[in-house]
């Protein structure tokens, strides 16, 4: 999906919580940052964004469910990937206090 020569993925933190998760068998929380160029015909650049993935563990310590949070909306990520020229439009809306 990402061009490995023009993209990056950074691990910002990782933490294990022994009593976390629905089953109380623990969770692993990973915070990351990524961005770069997608390998699509028009090579759109995805500006860096951060996110958090929470992996829920079962009684055997295996991942049975994961959740993701991003600091941008899925809508914004999708639109900026398909139409890179609208990136400035989103920034302008943000300067007006409108969150998209």
Image (spheres, helix red, strand yellow):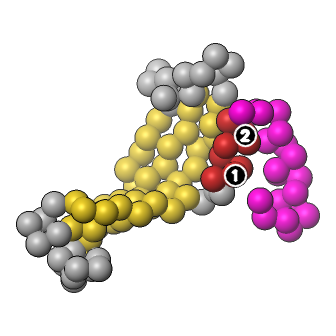
Is residue 2 shown left or right of residue 44? left
Viewport quadrant of the C terminus? bottom right
Stretch in magenta: 82-100
Give the Cα separation between the discs numbered 1 and 2.
8 Å
Question: Residue at label 2?
Answer: 80
- 90 over 59 or under it: above or below: above
The local crowd at label 1, few if under 14, some if 14 to 19, many if 20 or more residues have their Cα within 10 Å, is few
- 47 over 73 or under it: above or below: above
Find numbered disc 2 in the image and state the secondary structure of the residue it sits on: helix
Image position, residue 36 (x, y; %): 56, 33
Is residue 6 shown left or right of residue 58? right
Q: Could you tell me if the residues under marks 1 and 2 are in contact, i.e. CB atoms within 8 Å?
A: no
Is residue 72 shown left or right of residue 86? left
Q: Residue at x 67, y 43 (%)?
A: 78
Q: Can residue 74 be found in the magenta stretch?
A: no
Nearer the camera: disc 1 or disc 2: 1
Q: Main secondary structure of the magenta part?
A: helix
Image position, residue 1 (x, y; %): 48, 29
Q: Residue at x 76, y 33 (%)?
A: 84
Say which of 44 and 56 sits in front: 56
Q: Is residue 28 visible?
A: no
Question: Residue at label 1?
Answer: 75
Image position, residue 38 (x, y; %): 57, 27
Image position, residue 50 (x, y; %): 53, 54
Q: Can residue 92 be found in the magenta stretch?
A: yes
């Amino acid at each position: 999906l990402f061009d490995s020569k023009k993209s990056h993925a950074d691990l910002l933190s990782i933490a294990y919580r022994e009593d976390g998760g629905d089953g109380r068998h623990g969770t692993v929380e990973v915070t990351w940052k990524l961005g770069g160029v997608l390998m699509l015909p028009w090579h759109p650049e995805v500006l860096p964004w951060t996110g958090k993935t929470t992996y829920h563990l079962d009684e055997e310590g295996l991942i049975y469910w994961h959740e993701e949070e991003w600091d941008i909306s899925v809508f914004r990520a999708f639109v900026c990937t398909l139409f890179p020229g609208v990136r400035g439009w989103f920034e302008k809306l943000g300067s007006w206090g409108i969150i998209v």
